[in-house]
Image (spheres, helix red, strand yellow):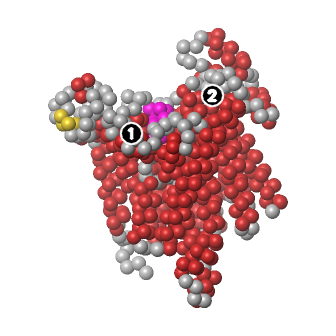
Amino acid sequence: MKRYLLKRLGQALLAVLGAATIVFFIIRLSGDPARLMLPPEASEEQVSALRESLGFNQPLWMQYLDYLRNLLTGDLGHSLYYKESALKLVLERMPATIDLAVFAILIAVTFGLLAGILSAYKKNSWIDYIVNAWIFLTQSLPVFWIGIVLIMVFAVRLHLLPTSGNRGLESIVLPAVTLAAYPIAPIARTMRASLLEVMDKGYMVTSRAQGFSKRRRVFKRGLKNAFLPVITVISLEFGVMIAGAVVTETIFSWPGVGQLIIQGVGNRDFPLVQASILVVSTIYIAITLITDLIYHRLDPRIKLQ
Amino acid sequence: MKRRSTPRIGVKGSVSIGALAAIFILTVFAPLIAPFDPYKQSLQDILIAPLSPYSGSGGTSLLGTDQLGRDVLSRLLYGGRLSLWISIAAVSISGVLGSAIGIAAGYFGGRTDAVLMRLADIQLSIPSMLLAIVMVAVLGSGLTNIVIVLAVTGWVTFARVVRSQVLSLKEMEYVEAAKAMGVPHLTVMLRHILPNTLYTIATQAALQISHMILLAAALSFLGLGIEVSTPTWGGMVNDGKSYIDSAWWLSTIPGLAIAAVILSINLFGDWLRDRAEER
């Protein structure tokens, strides 16, 4: 376990370094990052002043080393627009994003597990067909479209829920459902496939021969053994939700990190965009790491490839 | 076991191929089919509902007009053309690049494999949506740039899937035999490995096209796509967002168009996978 932990931790740190490096070079892809960060009408003096203050006039390798050194001390730069520590701004927005993701994953897990278990339990019945059709349909609908249709129906027509913003429990429902709409499908599909596979295992056949009822077999033994792959899917989807809330947060004006990134792009506030992406990627990598560790803990047969 | 040499197309195949052919014809021949000019604004026809008379050019606007009085159906057809073109171009580039990298990594193994796959892992550490957003923000949002950005986010999937198949293919006797006879590596890869991965690549390409359409639409929706006046499906949904209380058709219709295309492509991909399994 310890060796696995260390090796996996090393890989995760390498991934964070990789993400930081990619962001560093993308920002410099345009050739003149100082020009990129100022409005088109900015004067040549303003551009060279910014170039000077952010160190873009130094050789690339020195910029990179400085950048890494600053990252190690937790300095992710300053927002050009808010004139504040970028990390502080991102962390202020993080709770809203996490609230949304937690709410959404709860919805997705509830419906995904229910659909997956039912369709496996009643394989080839009408429930199974409906679940399959539902999976196929939700994977084809664009997230932003689901969000807009939900607003149209529940906020504009029925006046049941607010259209946007973050004011209490009511306002989280629509964005959370929007964000949950997609991951329900992979959770349900994995649950179904895994349960069906377990049902064919020797010990399940034995317990059938021992005369246990189907319900007892499925719910007492089957589920316990079938959950492992589902846990992986759920926690990976949770990571994707934190990263992918950009669109949902924009539709519902949800004050999270995703909205911060889009505003940052609009304001040409690249230090802030860079910091946001780094923080989100780090969380994403951490969730993947934790998933692997849980999986390894539950099933020690898993080895590093 | 198989009684027929030509495999059956079946319901899944015929429905999806039929739908895709229809979509292809409708969008490719958009200039001939579209009832009106998609860019023509008409002040007296602002936000008219579907199936209303379109006074700007005479005739009926089947799917209504937008906030500038432009015909939604015409914009939908032109927009579909662009959306499909972008995703097909992006998938072609990322497919060729990714498959080449996957074949090289799987075939040579060892250090080549380790370096290439580590590169793929590193790219995956940034969620692809965020990678696309920051790249478009830096490069600017022209047509070419969108294709490049989508291609960059897509190669990893191809590389990984193809690599894992090559790992088992290279143990095959005919590959061993070719190598033993001194056939050059490149020839072995092109003649003996590549043809056997084509099914996998095609299935993956179908799935990736639907993924790219969604990603491109999301970018346009966020205002990071192509110029605002050019019709794209994602952009049209975004335009309609401000009018959801007065003009439901603006956002709903392009969204349904995206869903129809994705549904057909996914069905087609499913059918391809079934066929690959039959083999």
The magenta segment: B216-226
Which amino acid type is shown beneath numbered disc 1? Val
- The mark nearer the N terminus, 1 or 2, is 1
Horizontal arrangement in the rendering, residue A56 relative to residue A132 (left or right): right
Q: Position of residue A109 (x, y in %)?
A: 56, 58
Q: Which residue is mark 2?
A: A270
Q: Is residue B225 magenta?
A: yes
Quarter of the image where the N terminus of chain A is located: bottom right
Q: Secondary structure at mark 1?
A: helix
The chain identifier of the residue carrying mark 1 reads A
Q: Is residue B219 above or below residue B190?
A: above
Q: Chain ID for label 2?
A: A
Left or right for A74, reference A206: right
Closer to us: A254 or B17: A254
A295, B169: nearer the viewer: A295
Which residue in the protein does label 1 denote?
Answer: A156
Residue shown at 73% from the left, 49% from the top: A12
The Cα–Cα distance between marks 1 and 2, rounded to whole angstroms, is 36 Å
Residue A21, position in %: x, y?
A: 70, 37
User: Which three-letter amino acid code belongs to the residue tagged 2?
Assistant: Phe
Q: Name the residue nearer the viewer: B84 or A117.
A: A117
Q: Is residue B180 left or right of residue B238?
A: right
Task: Indicate which disc residue A131 carries.
Answer: none
Asked whether the viewer can see residue A99, the reply is yes
* One can see residue B155 in this view: no
Question: Badge 2: few (under 14), some or many (20 or more) residues near its Cα, within 10 Å?
Answer: many
Label 1 crowd bin: few (<14), some (14–19), many (20+), radius 10 Å: some
Badge 2 marks a residue whose secondary structure is helix
